[in-house]
C-alpha cells in the first residue's frame, strides 16, 4: 500500500453581512496500490471535526468530503482530493440580529402550537350534563364488565427555542418527561398544575462572533417541546379483581370471589353449597374499600395513579410570553 500526501490547496471564502463566514482547504493524496477512499479517510493530515482553521481560529471544520479517484488509471493509481469545509456562524438559529443584546436576554423563536393525536383506553363516556373532558358514565357491557376498546384524544403542543447562558448536563434527566408541580405560564399559555409535560429539552452550544471575527458570545440554544393536556396527567383504572375484602363489620380478610348457579357472588363460605359455587373467571367490580360491588347496580369505581413525576420547572426559566 502506498499513499502519498502532496499538501494542501486553499479554497475560496464567503463572508456574509451578518458575519457568517465559510471557506475550504483541499488536501491532495496520490495512491499507487488501488487504495480506496476509506483508506484515505484514515490519513493523519485530515483534522477532526471542530478543529480550527490554521489561519483563522474562528473558523471550525464542520465537514469534509473525499473525491472519486482522478488521474492515472483511477483503479491502481491516481489522485484523491479531500475537501475540508470550515464555517463560522455569527448568529446561529436566532432571528434577532441585534448583537448588543446578550443571547440569553433575547426573545424566544421558532414558535409553533401544533397538536398530537394519541390513543387511550375508553373507560368513560359522556352523559347529559357532563362537561368537556369530564365524562361520567363507566363503559361497561350488559354484564357489568369493561369493554376492551380505545378512543382517540388530542393534546396541544408548544414548541419553541430560547437561549440560556448555561445548561447543566443533569437537566435533561431531571426535567424530561416530568409534569409541572405548580401552575405556570409559558408562551402566553397558562398551564394548571399537572396539566403540562416536557417531551423534549434539546440543548446545543452556540457561538457568536463580531464583525472582526472575535468570539462575542457562547451560549446554549434550547429546543423545547411540551404537551398541554386538557386534564391532569393521571391513570384511572377500574376497581375490579378476582378477590375481594370482607365487609366492614366482619374480619377484613381477602377472599376468592365465587358465583353459584343462580348468579350469587361472594365468599365461598357464604354461598349455598347445593348451588354449585365456582370461582369467577372474570374480574369483578369492587368498591373503593375493596369489598364486592353490588352486581345488580350500574357503575364502577376507579383508582387514580400518577405515572409522571411532578417537578418544579422554575430553574429552567421558560419564557412566559412570546415577546420575552
Image (spheres, rainbow, N blue to C red):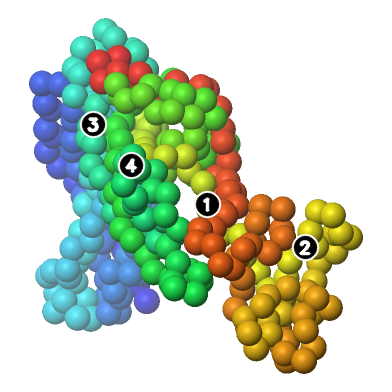
**Near-viewer residue (159 or 100):** 159
Give the residue pinned by disc 4: 129
Seen at 38% across and 32% down, the residue is 222
Mark 4, residues whose alpha carbon is within 10 Å: few (<14), some, or many (≥20)?
Answer: few
- Could you give the CA–CA distance between mark 2 and mark 1, rounded to whole angstroms? 23 Å
Count the labels in the image.
Answer: 4
The mark nearer the N terminus, 3 or 1, is 3
Specify the quadrant that holds the N terminus.
Answer: bottom left
Q: Which label lies toward us, 1 or 4?
A: 4
Q: Secondary structure at mark 3?
A: strand
Structural distance between the alpha carbons of marks 3 and 4: 37 Å
Location of residue 130 (image quadrant): top left
Labelled pair 4, 2 in contact (Cβ < 8 Å) = no
Q: Which mark is residue 111?
A: 3
Mark 4 or mark 2: name the one nearer the start of the chain.
4
Viewport quadrant of the C terminus: top left
Q: Is residue 269 left or right of residue 259?
A: right
Disc 2 and disc 3 in contact, CB within 8 angstroms? no
For residue 173, above or below residue 82: above
Would you say the residues marked 1 and 4 are in contact, meaning their CB atoms lie under 8 Å apart? no
Badge 2 vs badge 1, beta-carbon distance below 8 Å: no
Residue drawn at (52%, 51%), measured in percent from left and top? 235
Task: Specify which label sits upstream in the sequence, 2 or 1.
Answer: 1
Depth check, mark 3 against mark 4: the one in front is 4
> In the current view of this chain or complex, which residue is farthest to the right?
251
Q: Earlier in the sequence, mark 1 or mark 4?
A: 4
Marker disc for residue 235 = 1
Which label sits in the foreground, 3 or 1? 1
Element class at badge 1: strand
Q: Is residue 248 above or below residue 139?
A: above
Label 2 packing within 10 angstroms: few (<14), some (14-19), many (20+): many
Residue 77 seen anywhere in this rendered image of the structure:
yes
Amino acid at each position: 500500500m502506498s499513499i502519498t500526501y502532496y499538501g494542501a490547496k486553499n479554497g475560496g471564502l464567503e463572508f456574509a453581512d451578518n458575519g457568517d463566514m465559510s471557506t475550504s482547504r483541499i488536501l491532495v493524496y496520490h495512491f499507487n496500490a488501488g487504495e480506496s477512499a476509506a483508506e484515505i479517510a484514515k490519513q493523519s493530515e485530515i483534522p477532526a471535526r471542530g478543529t480550527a482553521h490554521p489561519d483563522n481560529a474562528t473558523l471550525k471544520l464542520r465537514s469534509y468530503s473525499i473525491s472519486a479517484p482522478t488521474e492515472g488509471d483511477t483503479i491502481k493509481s491516481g489522485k484523491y482530493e479531500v475537501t475540508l469545509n470550515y464555517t463560522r456562524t455569527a448568529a446561529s438559529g436566532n432571528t434577532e440580529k441585534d448583537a448588543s443584546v446578550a443571547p440569553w436576554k433575547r426573545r424566544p423563536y421558532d414558535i409553533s402550537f401544533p397538536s398530537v393525536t394519541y390513543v387511550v383506553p375508553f373507560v368513560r363516556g359522556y352523559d347529559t350534563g357532563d362537561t368537556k373532558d369530564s365524562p361520567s358514565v363507566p363503559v361497561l357491557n350488559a354484564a357489568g364488565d369493561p369493554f376492551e376498546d380505545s378512543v382517540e384524544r388530542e393534546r396541544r403542543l408548544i414548541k419553541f427555542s430560547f437561549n440560556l447562558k448555561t445548561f447543566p448536563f443533569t437537566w435533561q434527566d431531571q426535567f424530561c418527561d416530568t409534569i409541572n408541580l405548580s401552575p405556570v405560564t409559558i408562551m402566553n399559555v397558562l398551564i394548571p398544575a399537572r396539566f403540562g409535560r416536557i417531551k423534549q429539552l434539546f440543548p446545543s452550544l452556540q457561538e457568536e462572533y463580531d464583525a472582526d471575527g472575535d468570539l462575542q458570545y457562547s451560549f446554549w440554544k434550547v429546543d423545547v417541546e411540551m404537551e398541554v393536556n386538557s386534564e391532569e396527567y393521571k391513570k384511572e383504572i377500574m376497581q375490579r379483581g378476582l378477590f375481594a375484602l370482607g365487609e366492614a363489620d366482619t374480619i377484613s380478610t381477602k377472599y376468592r370471589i365465587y358465583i353459584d348457579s343462580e348468579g350469587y357472588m361472594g365468599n365461598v363460605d357464604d354461598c349455598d353449597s347445593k348451588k354449585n359455587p365456582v370461582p369467577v373467571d372474570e374480574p369483578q367490580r369492587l368498591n373503593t374499600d375493596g369489598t364486592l360491588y353490588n352486581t345488580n347496580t350500574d357503575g364502577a369505581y376507579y383508582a387514580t395513579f400518577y405515572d409522571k413525576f411532578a417537578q418544579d420547572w422554575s430553574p429552567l426559566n421558560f419564557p412566559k410570553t412570546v415577546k420575552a
